[in-house]
Amino acid sequence: METLVLIGLLGGLITGISPCILPMLPVIFFAGGVQGARPAAPSALRFDVPTAVRTGVGGRVESGVVTASRPPAPGTTETAAVPTGARPGGRSWRPYLVIAGLVLSFSTMTLLGSLVLGALGLPQDLLRWVGIGLLAALGVGMIVPRFEEVLERPFLRLASLGARKTPSQDRGAFLLGLGLGVLYVPCAGPVLAAITVAGATGDIGPGTVVLTLSFAVGAAIPLLVFALAGRRVAERVSGFRRHQRGIRVTGGVVVLLLAGALALNLPQQLQRALPDYTGALQQQVDENASVQDALDLGGIVTDANRELSNCANGSAELADCGTAPPLTGITRWLNTPGGAPVDLADLRGKVVLIDFWTYSCINCQRAIPHVTAWYDAYRDAGLEVIGVHTPEFAFERETRNVVAGARELGVDYPIAQDNSYSTWTTYRNRYWPAEYLVDADGTVRYIKHGEGDYDVTEQHVRDLLRAADPTVELPPATDVADTTPGEATTPETYLALNKVFNYAGEPDYGSGEQTYDHPDEQPQDTFSLGGRWAADFQGATAVSDDATLRLAYRSTDVYAVLGGKGTVTARVRSDDGTVLGERTVDVGGNPTLYDVLRGDGPTAGTVELEVSPGVTVYTFTFG
């Protein structure tokens, strides 16, 4: 348990100083720190304060209303009252209440949010919009205090913990933290992956709770430091102390701006424009053996999926690999009556093929004709196919894009959108495509990762259909050409910052806009950029009119996932620079896979792409 605490704290601390936290900082500074500064002391005695205190002869304390028409009696002195809740010499709890609310909200929603929403049949983004609405209401409340008083009443008891009376600066602090916790989206890492999967699958034990809380506390420590720094600045700078009302209104405006920016997904653009200065540190955590052992990374093993290890990839023999895990965390179902979910338990008696895919993946595109052919051929004989669409890129999370991709590929069997990677992780999957074949009793009997072996997979389908119903009449085996590349090819090449591995150019590949130069010679299986490009965690977007991309490849065909609007002109050159072939691709609509080169057979060469400004290159695949 101590190891999980340390791992959670370390993962949280890295997240707390990462670019992902930057959109929260203005709110933490103004609404969490500056607003919690001690009020300025009165510059002179006032006789219009309704709660003034009178000290009588002999030091006896007398109270009463002091007004301008009733000066102090002889032998007494007057002290102006401190505003309600503001303790002389004391400090507000506001920074701590904001962070406490954030920790509680983030921990609860991360562990239980997806599970509860799924059980209630509510959309998975409901909490996000509730959080945005809450932030907007709090922003208005900071500008209109009476509204904030009404808003915070249900939380007043929690918000006043640690004080007899809630200081005026503390109003809404805990509620603000709750709202920020719902909207807090840390950068992905191994710790957060383990927490998210546990929450999505409902596999929540003491270790998961400890890991979540320690992660939330670790991430909150830098935020608390920033809030306390804001309070300190406000107390030391006289301008802040003299303008408490203006500071409160400014904080409300900042909160409203954050709510609007989150609604428009603007913080994501900011994060993409900044260098990932914690990436190297996060990678060290990812690759640490102790962390991987503690979190069961590389396939989070649970009682529901432990026996999947019994299946060897692409085995010619059927095996017993345990009961098929449930399909969890599905955000939307497509190609089902009324969008109704599919429960594997309701399919007992049928053979089920679970196919993990994503529409822009060339490997999936080569495999899907086989899957659709099996569905058409054996559906009436008792075969059901479920396509679990787990996105590789952000644009593949959009339902409209999945619908369009499925239509183009002829997919008409049920599709489960696994945007949270919940089912992907439940099945310990790591590949696109991947097939899990389930018999009529609900047991996984065969697993195939990647392309190929289609004849083996189909034979297993036929065998299981006969086992389920010995009297079934099966049609002849399907006849779909296997287009899996047989020769060694260049590995899939990513331009996303967190996936790039074979860049060979100048300067180093980095986040944001910069100008690149090609090397004199392009090493085999590498790429480089020329001109000005903007790289982020999805891909690279051409900025200048002279933007080019050079790729030294080995394959018959070259494909690219492209987005934006414009043209890409591909030229194959010989060693002396002579153009051997040229092709222009018009890019438009949703990001998808395009043919860049088509060849007659395996070859090695160099292709240079002229990319018009605004076109994004996500990845290259080869076949």
Image: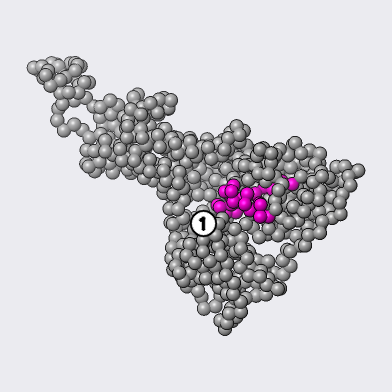
Answer left or right for 92 relative to 453. left
Residue furthest to the left in view is: 74
Give coordinates of residue 482: x percent, y percent.
Answer: 76, 62
| Residue 471 in view | yes
Give coordinates of residue 52: x percent, y percent.
Answer: 20, 21
Residue at 58% x, 35% y is 122
Secondary structure under the numbered disc 1 in the rendered image: loop
Q: Main SS type for the magenta part?
A: helix
Residue at 57% x, 42% y is 195
- Splitting the image into 4 quarters, where does residue 45 fall? top left
Give coordinates of residue 212: x percent, y percent.
Answer: 53, 40
Q: Quadrant of the N terminus?
A: top right
Answer left or right for 490 relative to 11. right
Residue furthest to the bottom in view is: 576
- Splitting the image into 4 quarters, where does residue 579 fall? bottom right
Mark 1 lies on residue? 537
Residue at 74% x, 36% y is 345
Name the amino acid, label 1: Phe
| Towards the viewer: 328 or 583 | 583
Mark 1: few/some/many CA within 10 Å (<14, 14-19, 20+): some
* Callout count: 1
Answer left or right for 324 relative to 576. right
Q: Quadrant of the C terminus?
A: bottom right
| Towards the viewer: 163 or 431 | 431
Residue at 49% x, 45% y is 185
Residue furthest to the right in view is: 471
Give coordinates of residue 12: x percent, y percent.
Answer: 49, 45
| 395 within the magenta span | yes
| Towards the viewer: 317 or 382 | 382
| 582 within the magenta span | no
Q: Which residues are magenta?
A: 385-409
Question: Looking at the picture, does residue 354 appear above or below residue 542?
Answer: above
